[in-house]
Amino acid sequence: TQIQQIMAESTIWFEAGLVETGSDYVTAASLDDGLQDKLLLQLVYEIQQTILSSLVARGDADSLVLHDMWARKYASPFQDPAADEPQQHTQYLNPGDLNSDIRIHLWLSPPAPTALSTNGLIVYHAEPPADFDPLQVPMEEVVETLLKPTNFANTTVPHKLNRAVIFNSRLFHTRQEEYESNPSVEPPTYPDKYPTELTILYGPPSHDDEDDLEGVGGDEL
């Protein structure tokens, strides 16, 4: 698709992941760093006008604006072909965003041929308290005090190309990526080799939002 091609050809990938940050991605691009292609901004606008307006009252949908957007590229799932056990990437528990209302997670790459059917995005039902600060509370404490008491209640959405997951942006979530070892299976072909995912955050407008969008095509939409 055109968006996949944009992600493959853009030179806006500045943030490093994995070892440097302890997260599960290779590199990332953000709205502030230049993730502002007109087609992406058109996607943001059309989601707000169609999908969001069907989920909430029309007036509420109109009041939701783009808070942030980023894309991430992940490591290839093909690891040691001699391994007997399924290969699993590091599961990184992502904190919710307390300043936004709705989070959209979009897969821009198909699942690998060896991916297990349980792969996808896990969204935990437990919502953090209003005064929760993800920078001050270790994720181990989140697991023990918020997730474990609910028996880790969650909704898992299977990974599928062009599938969007829409959920409360305050909720904790993680990527479930596990693969069978099968040396006879050829690696999947991506436009730029790395599986890519896009995240969009919507919330009520603020003065900061107006400053962030100034000059990135917001007036044209």
Image (cartoon, rainbow, N blue to C red):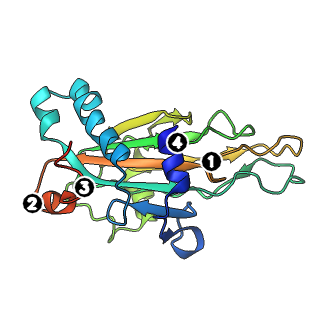
Q: Report if the CB atoms under discs 4 and 1 are less than 8 Å apart.
A: no
Residue at left 47%, top 70%?
A: 14
Q: Is 187 left or right of 157, judged from the image as shown?
A: right
Q: Where does label 3 land, which residue?
A: 98
* Viewer-proximal residue among 4 and 178: 4
Asked if labels 2 and 3 touch by Cβ distance under 8 angstroms, the answer is no
Q: Is residue 14 above or below residue 103?
A: below
Q: Sequence-wise, which precedes: disc 4 or disc 1?
A: 4
Mark with earlier residue (1, 2): 1
Question: Is residue 171 something that shows in the picture?
Answer: no
Is residue 112 visible to us here? yes
Categorize mark 3 by other alpha carbons within 10 Å: few (<14), some (14-19), many (20+). Answer: some
Residue lying at 78% horizontally and 56% vertically, measured from the top left: 79
Q: Classify mark 1: helix, strand or loop.
A: loop
Closer to the eye: label 1 or 2: 1
Q: Quadrant of residue 113?
A: top right
Q: Which residue is mark 1?
A: 191
State the CA–CA distance, disc 3 to disc 2. 17 Å
Q: Earlier in the sequence, mark 1 or mark 3?
A: 3
Q: Which residue in the protein does label 2 denote?
A: 207
Q: Position of residue 78 (x, y in %)?
A: 76, 52
Q: Secondary structure at mark 4?
A: loop
Q: CA distance from mark 4 to mark 1?
A: 10 Å
Give x and y (percent) for residue 27: 53, 64
Upstream in the sequence, badge 3 or badge 2? 3
Q: Which residue is mark 4?
A: 108
Where is residue 212? Give x, y as percent.
21, 61
Amino acid at the residue labelled 3: Leu
